[in-house]
Amino acid sequence: MRISELETPAILIDLDIMDRNLKRVADYARANDLIVKPHTKTHKIPALARRQMELGAAGVTVAKVGEAEVMLEANPPELYVAYPVIGRSKIERLIAVARKTRVTVGLDSLFAARQLSDAARAAQVSLRILAEVDAGMGRVGVSPGEELISLGRQISNLPWLELQGITFYPGHIQTTGDEAFTTQLKELATLVQTITTDWKRAGLPLHIVSGGSTPTLFQSHQIRGMTEIRPGTYIFNDRNTWAIGACSYEDCAASILTTVVSTARPNQIIVDGGTKTFSSDRQAASSEVSFGYIIEAPEAVLSKMNEEHGYIDLRGRETALSVGDRIRIIPNHICAAMNLHEQVYGIRGSEVVETWRVAGRGKLQ
Ligand SMILES: Cc1ncc(COP(=O)(O)O)c(C=O)c1O
């Protein structure tokens, strides 16, 4: 099928760019002795998880148990649930997953650890655990120092839990190449050194130090002691990854094909995708309100959205675009956009060569 035959709005994945993104990370990780467990929250498609593992990923990462269930289809030898799993029925589902593959869970409370330990004992299935430390994002994770060591000790005392080490997510680092980036990276490196030294001194097991993100991806070797990385967005990249300099325009594999449905109002065109197509994520590193980069008209701005309408402000310029024309827009945040679409299309040139169901979309539980 040709792209011109697709109904819109539709997410297009340029497979040559995607493969290049995956290979670059595989090569980098191999050269720097880092294990890759890509975060599949970006694509939510088992076939793409398989592709990541074909290129050397040791397993996959997910946030939610529902995503873990979906990713079993990719047969990952290891599955890291990088999110505290709380609540009995969820833990039962997690245990069912753990009967099929090796599961590791990140957590930051004794409450979460106890619940897992109780369920693991009842099911006679051991679970691998990483203690989550806050590396500066201020989201989840205990504070470095005594809190982390104490959590580690408590976990290691619980039956049926196998403490493997430490996990963190440097989501606070959202620039690249500038002074702030260098400083934040140095601080992170120092923090990880201190944490791992203290942890070992406390006699706690340290087989895994899990971290990584797309903005910090190619600087991961500077975080000495980190053993594995879990980048997610890197498979496609998006406008925000590009805006912060963590990739170039040429590395953006995903765009959303839309159709111009109205030019009735002056200085404006309307396309057939709004917040239910793109998500409402704002543009990073800019005060401009814009929800994507318009490939065919870079000077125009996707400045406003309703659920199904995207308002393109022509900024007073003439445009050759008319009703029925199709334009591709690189979304600000591809992970959130993927979650909104039932299927996406892999393209090479003007041909659609793959149609993937986004099997993990909406798997929030
Ligand atoms: C815990 C965790 N690990 C890894 C990632 C992947 O980050 P990125 O998409 O920047 O590669 C995320 C992203 O949200 C995350 O929350």
Image: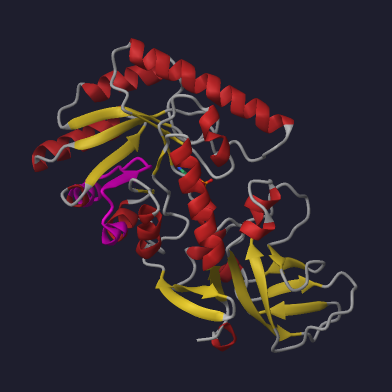
Judge from the rendering whether residue 42 lies leftward or rightward of residue 164; answer left or right: right
Judge from the rendering whether residue 44 lies leftward or rightward of residue 265; answer left or right: left
Q: Is residue 215 visible?
A: yes
Indicate the position of residue 106 as horizontal and vertical percent values. Answer: 34, 36
Indicate the position of residue 341 as horizontal and vertical percent values. Answer: 48, 71
Query: The C terminus appears in which quarter of the rendering?
Result: bottom left
Quadrant in which residue 175 is drawn? top right
Task: Tell me if residue 82 is in the magenta stretch.
Answer: yes
Q: Which residue occupies 41% across, 14% down?
A: 197
Task: Tell me if residue 185 is in the magenta stretch.
Answer: no
Would you place residue 8 above or below residue 226 in this image? Answer: below
Q: Which residue occupies 84% across, 80% down?
A: 319
Judge from the rendering whether residue 301 lies leftward or rightward of residue 133; answer left or right: right
Q: Nearer the viewer, residue 45 or 364?
A: 45
Judge from the rendering whether residue 346 lies leftward or rightward of residue 324; answer left or right: left
Indicate the position of residue 147 as horizontal and vertical percent values. Answer: 40, 18
Q: Nearer the viewer, residue 111 or 331?
A: 331
Would you place residue 194 above or below residue 33 in this image? Answer: above
Q: Which residue occupies 34% across, 34% down?
A: 107
Q: Which stretch is magenta?
A: 71-95
Quadrant in which residue 83 is drawn? top left
Question: How did the renderer colour the structure?
Answer: secondary structure
Q: Is residue 336 visible?
A: no
Would you place residue 199 above or below residue 24 in this image? Answer: above
Q: Which residue occupies 63% across, 78% down?
A: 258
Indicate the position of residue 176 as horizontal and vertical percent values. Answer: 67, 39
